[in-house]
Image (cartoon, rainbow, N blue to C red):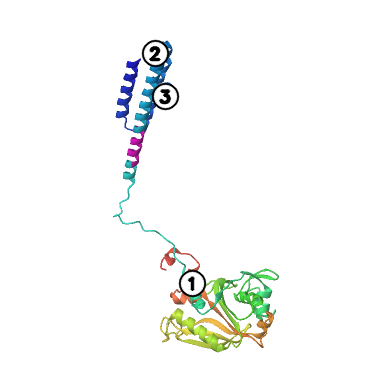
Amino acid sequence: MKEQIELIVAAAKKAVDEASDEKQIDEIRVKYLGKKGELTALLKQMGSLSAEERPIMGQMVNEAKAKLEEIVGAKQIQLKEKATELKLKAEQIDITMPAKEAKVGKLHPLNTVLNDMIDIFQSMGFDVLDGPEVETDHYNFECLNVPADHPARDMQDTFYLADNLLLRTQTSAAQIRTMENRKPPIRIICPGRVFRADEVDATHSPVFHQIEGLVVDKNVTMCDLKGVLEQFAKEIYGADTKVKFRPSFFPFTEPSVEVDVTCSECGGKGCRVCKGSGWIEILGAGMVHPNVLRSCGIDPEVYSGFAFGIGLDRLTTTRYKISDIRLLFENDKRFLDQF
């Protein structure tokens, strides 16, 4: 039996040395050390030995088993390390190769212009607020001094959802909500989508974007309005831009003005874009009507203010020389890739 043990150990060592992968070494372990392995079979034969021989042979079998377990374990570690090394070598990255270009999204031109405008007005101390797109008649019309018989309330101009519920036609409604809940001084802008029942063409859309501005405080004058809008125009169009105020009418401001800037295409000389006038209209503005202040609980004898409304879509088309407003909403990748 001693010779058998020595032969089994020698054969097992040779098999372990020749094993080339973890599967083979596991098969060797089962063959020699498993429940039905060769060393286990020897232990079952010990019943034929004398009482004196059994402990001696049992010790020899256990020593052989421990030795083989050590040899097999060492080989398993060696093969595992080798496999890991080969895997790392196969998966290594050549850092000298050019990197793949990462495709990232870009800002829509409307968002680019909006972010620029927010930066400009925030630098002048304005807060940025918003209101709901679904508004009530009270906030969208009544508090803005638009009487019940005003043409703007006609079903052909406004998207009504119910008798007193509509899609806001102007972001000025957010100004009313602000004045009701905040005491002067107030200095805010309200960017957002608005909705009007316009025919779709190169310059009109039923969905477009506005930025309303509002300042309410003591001793606010038209000079303050002019200074803010001139600074805004120069920041957007350049330091040489000139601003012109023309008398106009809005129910919620008095006096009211339309604001033009020198054409960015021709510099004021006259061209196709400005129809030869040298000027482009960009917004409407005026001093907040006393009735609007009263409807929000602000005393017009103590406070005054100005408001302005800028068409973000028109500003974007003039800034980037886009000929058709519909391009801003169609999500044509060929168009968006230019920005």
Would residue 278 be found to the left or right of residue 194 on screen?
left
- Across and down, in percent, residue 191 comes to 55, 73
**Helix, strand or loop for disc 1:** helix
* The disc label shown at residue 146, or none: none
Mark 3 or mark 2: which comes first in sequence?
Answer: 3
Q: Which residues are magenta?
A: 75-84
66 or 89: nearer the viewer: 66
Name the front one of labels 2 and 1: 2
**Helix, strand or loop for disc 3:** loop
60 or 266: nearer the viewer: 60
Give yes or no for residue 82 being in the magenta stretch. Answer: yes
Q: Which residue type carries mark 3?
A: Gly
- Identify the residue under disc 3: 34
Would residue 243 be found to the left or right of residue 248 on screen?
left
- Across and down, in percent, residue 82 comes to 32, 38
Q: Give the overall secondary structure of the magenta segment.
A: helix
**Helix, strand or loop for disc 2:** helix
Question: Pointer 3: residues within 10 angstroms few (<14), some, or many (20+)?
Answer: some
Q: Which residue type carries mark 1?
A: Asn
User: Which residue occupies 34% across, 20% down?
Assistant: 8
Among the 4 quarters of the image, the one containing residue 35 = top left
* The disc label shown at residue 53, or none: 2
- Identify the residue under disc 1: 115
